[in-house]
Amino acid sequence: MSLATAALAHARADRDAALARLVELVSIPSISTDPAHAPDIRRAAEWVAGRLRDAGAAGVRIDETARHPVVYGEVLVDAAAPTVLVYGHYDVQPVDPVELWDTPPFTPTVRDGRLYARGACDDKGQLMTHLEALAAWRAVGGKPPVNLKVILEGEEEIGSPNLDAWVRAHKGELGAELAVISDTAMLAPGQPSICYGLRGLAYVEIEVTGAPGDLHSGVYGGAVKNPASALAQIIAALHDDQGRVTIPGFYDAVVGLTDAERADLAAVPFDLGAFGQATGQAGGWGDPAYSIVERLGARPTLDVNGIWSGWTGPGAKTVLPAKAHAKVSMRLVPDQSPHEAAAQLAAHVQTLAPAGVSVAVRELHGGWPARVDRGMPALNAAAAALESAFGRAPHLTLEGGSVPVVALFKQELGLDTVMLGFGLPDDNLHAPNEKFSLDNYFRGIETNIHFLANLAAAAQGAAGGRA
Amino acid sequence: MSLATAALAHARADRDAALARLVELVSIPSISTDPAHAPDIRRAAEWVAGRLRDAGAAGVRIDETARHPVVYGEVLVDAAAPTVLVYGHYDVQPVDPVELWDTPPFTPTVRDGRLYARGACDDKGQLMTHLEALAAWRAVGGKPPVNLKVILEGEEEIGSPNLDAWVRAHKGELGAELAVISDTAMLAPGQPSICYGLRGLAYVEIEVTGAPGDLHSGVYGGAVKNPASALAQIIAALHDDQGRVTIPGFYDAVVGLTDAERADLAAVPFDLGAFGQATGQAGGWGDPAYSIVERLGARPTLDVNGIWSGWTGPGAKTVLPAKAHAKVSMRLVPDQSPHEAAAQLAAHVQTLAPAGVSVAVRELHGGWPARVDRGMPALNAAAAALESAFGRAPHLTLEGGSVPVVALFKQELGLDTVMLGFGLPDDNLHAPNEKFSLDNYFRGIETNIHFLANLAAAAQGAAGGRA
């Protein structure tokens, strides 16, 4: 029995324990955006560092940053073997509206073969597939067949404000042949996929100001421009009636899809039923020149993420608000730039602002879009690994979310990233009742074991060929 | 020295004590919309009932309703004298955003001759002018020269949901010749006015629903109609580019102004400087076919009072919200109906709702507009009283706010209401730093003493003429 086979057998036998470990991790409310949860972020960092150490990594350390720490560790087995950079994030999104959770977000609960908890899928469950795979090699008395460098971040959900600096500062020790990240989704249960492109993000806050203070809507109503109405006008004008974004220049840098890509994307078995169930909009919405799959993966967007003004409590308050706010984000595709998109939006919003109010736009954060080379050899190793673990060959897909670190690894380290996603489209990321399929968790661990073995075999084959 | 003269002298000598009593009352956080403040509402009811008793009223009682109680008391001096129904409300608006108050809203503070506190003007300070006037007659060993029936309500700021029923149930004991209410504003310091018309109100909540739950804006953005954008579209479409409300039929029932009224309103010394300072919009906004004074008093409006959706906390959350809400109210003028206006709005909103979302409109509360007969004799008594107390004759004005009880008294009791307002346009009603001019408070007390004396004299003159 090869070590890989033994590691696989161990992983299968150890599923209950692997689940128990994940339950421990998702019990920690490591919400990175909320300063009140800073101690929980710290606890989560220490937990993953400990697990990384237990899994056989050396030199595991918790590197401080200006906010939340980066956990780093290495398993260096053979200078001649390929080196894989593994990335995951141990921070999670906030849990509001918490009253919509069926079970408390940090009291992990297994129902119908799924683990319900904030972070179960995004990204604690997925990062654990890598740590568990690593631990499996060690449990059977061996070492993985490739070198691994593992980066676990605590700021992904707030836009990774300190990761760029950390990566630049540690460039010298981060040399690798490729990166692997599990922070994306599969197409459907039993149907694996490899994501080769992700959208970027430009996130801004708009503040509209009318009067110096709130006014009585009876005393002043009818003679004063209402900032909430002004904000509504601005937001309404950001799309045309076909769902296209109206910001001048917004689409200029967008790289179109090739005919081959469009054909491949058209072949992706997109689950319209699940989409309709999740969204309540079976027919979808948006630019009719593109399919839903293309709109989600290959086209940029603009969405309101939050809006607030005036009286939002129970009952009726007859206030004419002084201010109105919105959080607005744009998903970006190659070669759009987050800063340029934010600047274009800010300029356009000023032209849309009606008389009587003033408008300020503040950039909250951004991330670059990414698309990796579809011909990259490691994709074959990954595809074979997925087929071994799930019994079905993966599709190549584009995803709509943002994993800005993919662009960072390309820009700073010259690495392409293999995105081995084990989430499902209805896993309620960033929403109440986030969940993770236990089957995907366990098969994800096995996929990673296969993947490392396949990478090593391919490298040996290539070396043998050269010899 | 007549009793009235003695009462006036007493009121002047007793100013410090009158202020101390008002400070006691405004220290009670009687916010009627917030269930957590129900005990404070009760305390405020007991306080005003006690004060009414001390001022000489008989049979003072606290009548329970389905929510907050009505305080009632009478001073019956002479069956041949006229009877005046006095109305005030002891509940107040919420205090958010509380961080914008220079001093805490329920820690009354005197600065520059003004009392700063929630309710200082609306309506505790103004209702106290009546209780203090009544107390002044008693303090000099006399009784007021007319009969008084005093109603003090605890639900005005939530739309008086139980007052109609209370008034109907007590119709038999509420017989009177006229009503007087101090819950409006003077034009400017030193320039009294009598309000002869008030706007009504129709207040609704709009709920837009997209997906069954919040979605990840990356996973679904670009293929799903965003309910916050949909709400923005709806709100933006509720006005045309001239500031007119677009709801079909909205203006059909509006009674136009006569040429005489327009001329009188044009002569009102409207303080454009103060308006500009309070609103930040010196030129005003709205339907260019009407002056600012007309827009504020004689024209109906539609305003967003609150809006909320998605993530409104600190930082960036990439949520595509499932729901978006707005509180929207319309100020109404004769002969618009609150229910009809709400129904018209609800119907129009349905036609504006874009595909992909559903919209529900819920009526929160309403109040009828009112306009009293400008030729009514008690207006002369009131005008003379104001001139005696302030040294200047009042203007006849229309006000933009709502005092729905004026319509109620007309409909149920057949009474016209004299609105003796002592507020000022910049008193920050319903907003942070609400205040009340102490000069207006003290002159308000004196005005009420004069007013009762003038009413009695006019009745005696009329009776003498008939004899």
Image (tube, coloured by chain):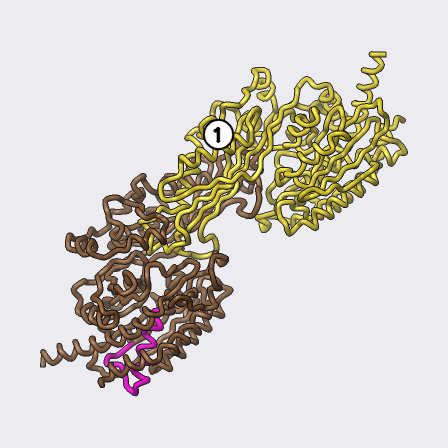
Chain colours: A brown, B yellow
In depth, the one of B208 and A392 nearer the eye is: A392
Residue drawn at point x = 48 percent, y = 23 percent: B289
Q: Is residue A54 above or below residue A306?
A: below
Please identify the dominant SS of the magenta region. helix
- The single residue placed furthest to the front in the displayed view is A112
Q: Amino acid at mark 1?
A: Gly
In the shown orientation, is residue A207 left or right of residue B12?
left
Task: Report x, y in % for residue B62.
Answer: 76, 42
Classify the position of the N terminus of chain A by image quarter.
bottom left
**Would you say residue B62 is visible in this rendering?**
yes
Q: Is residue A139 magenta?
A: yes
User: Hey, which quadrant is residue B145 in on the image?
Assistant: top right
Q: Which residues are magenta?
A: A126-148
Residue drawn at point x = 55 percent, y = 42 percent: A213
In the shown orientation, is residue B17 left or right of residue B362?
right
- The single residue placed furthest to the bottom in the displayed view is A141
In the shown orientation, is residue A13 left or right of residue A64?
left
In depth, the one of B330 and A389 nearer the eye is: A389
Of all chains, the one bearing label 1 is B
In depth, the one of A147 and B115 nearer the eye is: A147
User: Hey, which quadrant is residue B279 in on the image?
Assistant: top right
Classify the position of the C terminus of chain A by image quarter.
bottom left
Task: Report x, y in % for residue B222.
Answer: 31, 49
Task: Report x, y in % for residue B64.
Answer: 72, 43
Task: Report x, y in % for residue B42.
Answer: 72, 47
**Would you say residue A211 is visible in this rendering?**
no
User: Hey, which quadrant is residue A41 in on the image?
Assistant: bottom left
Q: Residues within 10 Å of mark 1 (few under 14, many from 20)?
A: many
Residue drawn at point x = 60 percent, y = 30 percent: B368
What residue sits right under mark 1 in the picture? Answer: B286
- The single residue placed furthest to the top in the displayed view is B466
Residue drawn at point x = 22 percent, y = 72 percent: A388
